[in-house]
Structure formats: C-alpha cells, structure tokens
Amino acid sequence: MLGAVVEVYPNKWPEGVEPNGAIAFVDRDGVLNIGSPNYINNPEELILLDGAAETIGDLKRLGFKICIVTNQSAIFRELWDEDRLHEIHSELSRIMLSIDSDAFVDLIITCPHRQFDRCSCRKPMPGMLYLGDQILRSNLVLPLKLNKNVPIPKVATNINWWKDKPKPVNTLDIMVGDRKSDLGAGWGFGTRLFKVRADIGIVEVKDRLLNPLDSGDVFQPVR
Ligand SMILES: [Mg+2]
Ligand SMILES: [Zn+2]
C-alpha cells in the first residue's frame, strides 16, 4: 500500500470568519509558485507567483479551507526526502503569510511516487482529494505535523472515468491546477474545476473562484 505525505497545520481563521464547509484544493507548482522541469529542490528555489498569496487570503476570508495537493516524484527518485519537502513547504507558508496574513494553508498532501509505482494519490488519480476531505471534514486525526505513508481511502481507486462526474461533497469545492492531470483529480472528486496558465497561476481565476455561481471549466477525462 503506497501512501501520501501529509503536513497538517493549525486550524486558523481570519478574524470573524466562519468556515463555509468547502475546500479549495490547489496544485502547487505553476499555481502558487513558479514551477521547474527539474523540481523545486530547496526553499531557495521557491518564487511565489504574483497575487497567489492574496488569492488564498481571499478564499480564506470567504470561509474556504485550503488543501495543497502536489505530485513530487523527486522523493521516490531519492533526490531528496520528506524533511526537505517540509522545509520547502514551511518557506512557502512563511512567504504567503508575509504577503497576506490571512493566507493560511490548512493541509498539504504530497504524492511522493513515480508513475510506475501505480499509487492512487498521483494526479490524475483523485486520492489526495479524498484524503484531504477525510482529514478536513471527517474525523481522521493525524498525530504529527509531518506524516509519511498515510493510506489513501479505497473509494478513490474506484473512479469510473467513462461515467458522469461524481457528485461533489460540497458544491463550492474547487480544484485549481495548471495541468490536465489536476483537472482529472478534481473531476474524480466532483469539484468545480479551474485551469490556469503556469506563468500566471491562481490569480488568473481569482474572480471566478470567489463567485459561487461559476460552475468552473468544462472537462471530460476520457471523452
Ligand atoms: Mg502544476
Ligand atoms: Zn502517490
């Protein structure tokens, strides 16, 4: 059983804001920070995209929980380990909060596997979204700030890509990504889908994300 890396942050809300029950699932590279074909390998390589922190802050101010879901196969390629990942993510959080003090990230889930490991967390599989739902909206409590090899819920392996998009847990749930594989993962969990350009990132769809009437991009995984 191949599990995911899960980083849990304290449950913090902007002053006076009530959670709205929805989760914004957000890809990392090309959405929050500038991506690289050779991975982001250390905190020094992180460059935040303009407007990313403010967009996350706006989503928090509307009551969304934020869950980053990212494929980082460098870990199973043994280029670096989960502790390095955690350093990179601590820096990402620090930078975002320095720009917008409401830009808390609640949860970061990372698939550390390669394509041929055949896990159910690597996007376009929706496993990280099902796991994020379990942690943020059900009662799965993880003991550590940095948890390794956390099992993916079995239901995530039974997606029928040829049928209709699954019904969302919360109709406001969002998946934002710069690749088709991000949209596939969101589709498999039934969220609204938003594709962005990797050189612009999440700010490209900021107004749409904040609009509850925007049903997202049309996407069919196989048709
Ligand atoms: Mg990306
Ligand atoms: Zn995986």
Image: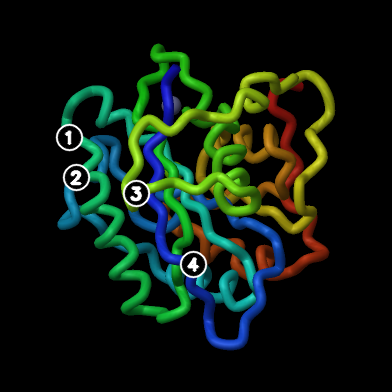
From this view, report whether residue 29 is shown above or below residue 38.
Answer: below
Proximity of marks 2 and 1: CB atoms separated by less than 8 Å = yes
Mark 2 vs mark 1, CA separation in Å = 6 Å
Dot 4 falls on a residue whose secondary structure is loop
Mark 3 vs mark 2, CA separation in Å = 16 Å
Where residue 166 sits in the image (x, y, percent)? Answer: 79, 34
What residue is disc 2 on?
Answer: 84
Which of labels 1 and 3 is toward the front?
A: 3
Q: Does the residue labelled 1 lie within 8 Å of ligand 2?
A: no
Mark 2 closeness class: few <14, some 14–19, many ≥20 residues within 10 Å? some
Where residue 153 sits in the image (x, y, percent)? Answer: 59, 29
The residue under label 2 is which amino acid type? Arg
Sequence-first disc among 3 and 4: 4
What residue is disc 4 on?
Answer: 11
**In this image, 62 relative to 211: left or right?**
left
Proximity of marks 4 and 1: CB atoms separated by less than 8 Å = no
Which of labels 2 and 4 is toward the front?
A: 4
Q: Which mark is residue 202?
A: none
